[in-house]
């Protein structure tokens, strides 16, 4: 059975959460490849949104949409970055990274 300390270490709260109680967390014991896939999905979505915005004419844009776009890009990139960091910590170290050659 998991103790509260073990659960605290297992579930990494996302920084992009607005509340003091973490609702969205990363399961640090999940398969690192699945964590990488989740990171890739979020970074790809942010990249696709940026590409769409780059191709749009800002003359047609509504200025009130800018905060919404920035918020979406922030959430996607922040979550993707945190997922990458957790996956990096979970992947096995290579011999060159550990100082062995």
Image (cartoon, helix red, strand yellow):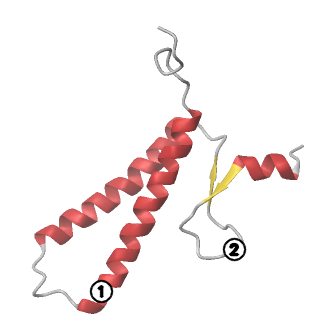
Labels in figure, total: 2
Looking at the image, residue 48 sits to the left or right of residue 39; the answer is left
> Residue at label 1?
65
Q: Residue at x 18, y 86 (%)?
A: 61
Give the camera-side residue of 27 and 13.
13
Q: Earlier in the sequence, mark 2 or mark 1?
A: 2
**SS assignment at label 2:** loop
Quadrant of the drawing holding the N terminus? top right
Residue 79 screen position, x and y as percent: 49, 59
Q: Is residue 92 above or below residue 101?
A: below
Q: Residue at x 57, y 37 (%)?
A: 89
Residue 4 screen position, x and y as percent: 86, 53
Residue 71 screen position, x and y as percent: 40, 75
Residue 43 screen position, x and y as percent: 36, 54
Q: Is residue 15 above or below residue 6?
A: below
Q: Residue furthest front?
A: 99
Looking at the image, residue 60 sits to the left or right of residue 31; the answer is left
**SS assignment at label 1:** helix
Looking at the image, residue 47 sits to the left or right of residue 7; the answer is left
Mark 2 vs mark 1, foreground winner is 2
Q: Residue at x 40, y 60 (%)?
A: 77
Tag of residue 37:
none
Circle 2 packing at 10 Å, graded few (<14), some (14-19), many (20+), is: few
Answer whether labels 2 and 1 touch (C-beta < 8 Å). Answer: no
> Residue at label 2?
20
Circle 1 packing at 10 Å, graded few (<14), some (14-19), many (20+), is: few
């Amino acid at each position: 059975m998991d103790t509260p300390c073990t659960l605290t270490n297992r579930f990494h709260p996302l920084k992009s959460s607005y509340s003091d109680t973490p609702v969205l967390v990363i399961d640090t014991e999940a398969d690192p490849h699945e964590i990488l896939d989740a990171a890739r999905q979020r970074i790809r979505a942010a990249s696709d949104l940026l590409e769409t915005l780059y191709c749009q004419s800002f003359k047609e844009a509504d200025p009130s949409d800018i905060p919404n776009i920035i918020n979406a890009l922030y959430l996607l990139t922040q979550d993707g970055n945190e997922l990458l960091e957790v996956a990096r910590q979970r992947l096995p170290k290579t011999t060159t990274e550990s100082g062995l050659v």
